[in-house]
Image (cartoon, coloured by chain):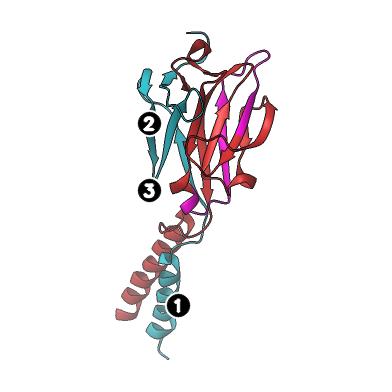
Chain colours: A cyan, B red
């Protein structure tokens, strides 16, 4: 094996293994910020490929409006 | 900032006004952990977490008298619908973080650096051999 083969082969191997996707955990984080005030009875938030839908209820099974607000009395 | 209820005390989740989340798309990712963030917990405020597989139904009481600003749902991922209630106080839901184990298609920074190192070595050695 000539010098080119000695060094090119290891370099290619390193390169190939470098671009193999890594197995790593990922986190979908939803932070529920939208316009303040009445959101209607249902609202959907997205993060990456996933979405999360909220529905408000008053009495069981009866929809009630959601409300986006800052902490504290309003 | 967080989500409450328009008709609840202080526009928060309070009394009969509860908030239900549909986790269907998150559960499809088979998360290893799901952490729910709760805020505006003041004084005697507490909250309950319920789990159900029927929309509009609270279902099974998973936890009560909670005062923490985060609630770990990782042991309750068999439920598609999670309901937050605060019968004797008022709270807001402000975040949710789902950790999904598996395949990250983006090479980590260390791997990218290794690739650049390998390519630089390849170019350098090729030039050396040509001499």
The numbered disc on residue A43 is 2
Q: Which residue is mark 3?
A: A49
Examine the rendered structure and indicate whether residue A13 appears above or below residue B65: below
The numbered disc on residue B94 is none
In this rendering, do the residues under marks 2 and 1 share a single chain? Answer: yes
Spatial separation of the CA atoms under disc 2 and disc 3: 17 Å
The numbered disc on residue A10 is 1
The local crowd at label 2, few if under 14, some if 14 to 19, many if 20 or more residues have their Cα within 10 Å, is: some
Callout 3: chain: A
Label 2–label 1 contact, CB within 8 A: no
Horizontally, is B93 left or right of A35 in the view?
right
Q: Is residue B122 magenta?
A: no
SS of the residue under disc 2: strand
Examine the rendered structure and indicate whether residue A27 appears above or below residue A73: below
Examine the rendered structure and indicate whether residue B114 appears above or below residue B95: below
Callout 2: chain: A
Residue in front for this viewpoint, B57 or A22: B57
Taking the spot 45% from the left edge, 70% from the top edge, the residue there is A17
Q: Is residue B41 magenta?
A: yes
Examine the rendered structure and indicate whether residue B113 appears above or below residue B99: below
| Residue B52 sits in quarter | top right
């Amino acid at each position: 094996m000539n010098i080119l083969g000695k060094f090119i082969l290891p370099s290619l191997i390193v390169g190939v293994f470098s671009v193999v996707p890594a197995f790593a955990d990922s986190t979908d984080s939803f932070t529920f910020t939208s316009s303040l005030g009445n959101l209607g009875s249902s609202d959907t938030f997205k993060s990456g490929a996933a979405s999360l839908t909220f529905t408000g209820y008053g009495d069981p099974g009866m929809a009630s409006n959601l409300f986006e607000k800052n902490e504290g009395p309003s | 900032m967080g989500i409450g209820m328009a008709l609840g005390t202080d526009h928060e989740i309070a009394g009969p006004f509860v908030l239900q989340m549909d986790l269907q798309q998150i559960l499809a990712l088979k998360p290893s952990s799901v952490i729910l963030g709760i805020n505006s917990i003041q004084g005697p405020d507490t909250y309950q977490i319920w789990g159900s597989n029927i929309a509009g139904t609270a279902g099974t009481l998973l936890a009560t008298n909670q005062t923490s600003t985060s609630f770990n749902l990782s042991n309750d991922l068999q439920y598609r619908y999670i309901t937050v209630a605060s019968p004797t106080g008022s709270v807001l839901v402000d975040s949710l973080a789902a950790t999904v184990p598996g395949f990250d298609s983006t090479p980590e920074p260390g791997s990218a650096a290794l690739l650049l190192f390998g390519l630089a070595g390849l170019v350098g050695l090729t030039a050396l051999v040509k001499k």
